[in-house]
Amino acid sequence: MISPSNHGGVAGTAESENAPRADALGRLIAPLARVGPRSFPPGFVWGVATAAPQIEGGAWEGGKGPSIWDTFCRLPGKVHNGDTLDVACDHYHRFEDDFTLMAALGVKNYRMSIAWPRIFPSGRGPRNQQGIDFYNRLIDAAQARGITPWVTMFHWDLPQRLENEGGWRTRAVVDAFAVYADTIVLAYGDRVKNWISLNEISCFTEQAYGGDEKAPGVRESQAVVNQTYHHALLCHGHGVRAVREHGGRGARVGLSDNAAVMIPVSETPADIAAARAGFVAENARVIDAIYRGRYHPDYLARAGADAPVHTEKDFELISLPADFLGLNIYTGRFVRANAAGNPETVPFTENYPRADSPWLWLAPRALYWGTRHVHEIYGEKSVFITENGAGYNETPAADGEVLDLNRVEYARSCLQELDRAIVDGVPVHGYFLWSFMDNFEWQDGYNRRFGIVHVDFVSQKRTPKLSARWFSQVITEHRLV
């Protein structure tokens, strides 16, 4: 601030003249103060996430049966460089050291998944005690280091035997999943109190049976694709039911969904209304169905003869109340209201920033609008970001360090938007960064790295990146840094 003496007047006069100027400056910087370093709410959960098929390896050990991804990655041209899940990050043998590193970084919450074919090698029938024992050891090792497990029941690794029998196309998969869910909640529910039923339904249904991006990589009719969605929703219902019946005191359960997030181009009433309408329409097959206990009439009208076969009783299971909704948000779509007031997508320009993963346009505002939409439209009172991150083709420097400033800045921008949502009253209760370490990135193999810990897939050496140090400080200080 300029000294009064610089104006050649007495102190009293200078203060009087500068008062309006100071008020204007205060109004200018007030919005900036809100997005500066501030503490997140008490009890806010910070964590990292992985998935069993992407990190475990040991694909043919301990009695595990083959998954559809074990099969898919062996089909020529399906996965970059012909990479497989056979070894991955070798977490199957190295989980003790991985948890020690996790704890050293200050991580207290870890979202993991259980491999269905490690528990039931054929998807149903005799259970594999070696697999059950493995996760007992793994869960105990995490908790011994002060790390709370958040367990996803299904993260895409359907047992190949079930796929041979029809997979998600058939209702039989629902019955098999019900037994599987009961089994793992009974086995681990004395220690695991945070459960996630399924991860990203659209990826293992539409992208797997309506295209060749995800295993099993077949192209079925739209009617079949819609039916796979319905069977997945029934499995979500069984996941909730299993936790209610066997989870014990304090157990909670929710879904992790990669909802299509609509971001209003301008935060005007018209564009916001268009974004809300677009959000409902784009997520009618999953989120709207779960919260409303029926399929949206507009969705059924669009589907016509391709609508899934279902009964009202199905929705008694599908719409069982969960305890939270997990959102996996990486990107979003910008929309505006057209002349008729309907949502119109504004396409990304070629030079709009994105990660090395070609689908990952960097749109941090998606975290604000995604969480706000589910709260305002469906009344959800507990939202967790169960995945958020960015994939790059990273090469360590000569000294082995990975200075991933791009990841740090993107994550920080996303957390600023999450902070904004919390300030605006959205009940966001936690954030899990994807991923703890570089891993098998599905059809991209080991070419796309999402981890905050670098993995040398030959030596299996782990090296924390710049982002790991930064996120560790965020966790420790419970605020943006």
Image (tube, helix red, strand yellow):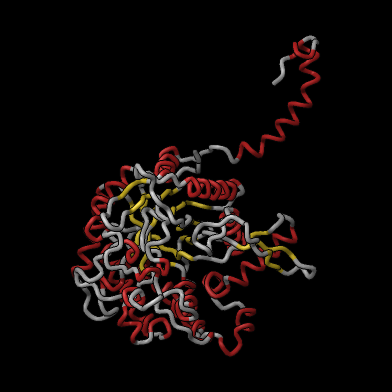
The quarter of the picture where residue 204 lies is bottom left
- Between 110 and 408, the one nearer to me in the picture: 408
Instruction: From the top left corner, tell me how far across and down residue 299 is, in percent.
Output: 61, 79
> At 26% across and 54% down in the image, what residue appears?
459
In the image, 188: left or right of 10? left
- Choose top left, top right, bottom left or bottom right for residue 264: bottom right
Q: Residue 411's spot in the image, x, y percent?
A: 50, 49
Residue found farthest to the front = 398
**How many numbered marks appear?**
0
Observer-nearest residue: 280 or 208?
A: 208
Q: Position of residue 358 (x, y in %)?
A: 52, 63
Residue 148 x %, y %? 33, 52
- Residue at left 78%, top 15%? 14
Residue 168 seen in this snapshot: yes
Outermost residue on the bottom side: it is 305
In the displayed structure image, the side of residue 461 where residue 316 appears, left or right = right
Residue drawn where x is 47% and y is 75% of the image: 318
Is residue 151 visible in this depiction of the protein?
no
Dividing the picture into quadrants, the one containing residue 63 is bottom left
Name the quarter where the N terminus is drawn: top right
> Is residue 136 or residue 345 the one in the foreground?
345
26 or 382, which lies in front? 26
> In the picture shown, does residue 181 fall above or below 325?
below
